[in-house]
Image (tube, coloured by chain):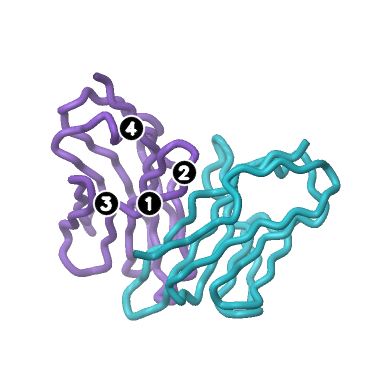
Chain colours: A purple, B cyan
Amino acid sequence: AQSVTQLDSHVSVSEGTPVLLRCNYSSSYSPSLFWYVQHPNKGLQLLLKYTSAATLVKGINGFEAEFKKSETSFHLTKPSAHMSDAAEYFCVVSVNNYGQNFVFGPGTRLSVLP
Amino acid sequence: DVKVTQSSRYLVKRTGEKVFLECVQDMDHENMFWYRQDPGLGLRLIYFSYDVKMKEKGDIPEGYSVSREKKERFSLILESASTNQTSMYLCASSGTGLSNQPQHFGDGTRLSIL
């Protein structure tokens, strides 16, 4: 069975400083991994995805994530936070090629201080 | 870009009413999903559908039913609305393929049952 752990429920950074949102997963098979962002009262927007190609994945809005199989991690980073990055972030794992099986992490709320 | 459209952003209904939430996607995706999102509980899968007229129960199907008569449209039905069904409802779709396809989400429907 798959599971996803997001190690921090809330992360607070100052504008212009780096962002690190941590995600660890458990999977019996080679997973696909995704990061989504959700702004208040909106749906989830795909930031980036890992599907067994390059281990360093670049996404939208300057975010990137590195897949580390030995650590079963897929942490999300951004070099410099912007006020508009304040939102909820979800790490998601999938092992089904039929696009049917997605396991969501509990989410990390990112606050960006001026 | 994939577009998933939910018919209402905000909806207010009364206890005992039959409520329909509609979702339409424009990317010919095989899979469609309904989730509810509540503070502290994350995203919980209600139902998903992998083809027209096909459906599978998710984690919390009680009190809900679904309908998928056309590939692009997936409806969530609250047979007799109750106050504990007040929530944010999110629709998503995904395709199938050789590598895992991400889900694409609508903007959500915030449903209040009075």
Kindly state the secondary structure of the residue where label 1 is placed: strand
Decide if residue A77 is in sight here: yes
For badge 4, the amino acid type reads Ala
- Taking the view exactly as shown, the residue that stands out farthest to the top is A114
The mark closer to the camera, 2 or 3, is 2
Indicate left or right for B25 with A72 as reference: right
Q: Amino acid at mark 1?
A: Gln
Circles 3 and 1, Cβ within 8 Å, touching? The answer is no
- Residue to which mark 2 is pinned: A42
Chain to which the residue tagged by mark 4 belongs: A
For marks 4 and 2 on the same chain, the one whose residue lies earlier in the sequence = 2
CA gap, disc 2 and disc 3: 24 Å
Image x and y of residue A65, in percent: 21, 51
Q: Earlier in the sequence, mark 3 or mark 4?
A: 3
Q: Quadrant of the C terminus of chain A?
A: top left
| Type of amino acid at the residue the image marks with label 3 | Phe
For marks 2 and 1, give the CA distance. 9 Å
Query: Real-space Cα distance between discs 1 and 4?
Result: 14 Å
- Please tell me the numbered disc located at residue A86: 4
Question: Marks 4 and 2: same chain?
Answer: yes
> What is the chain letter for disc 2?
A
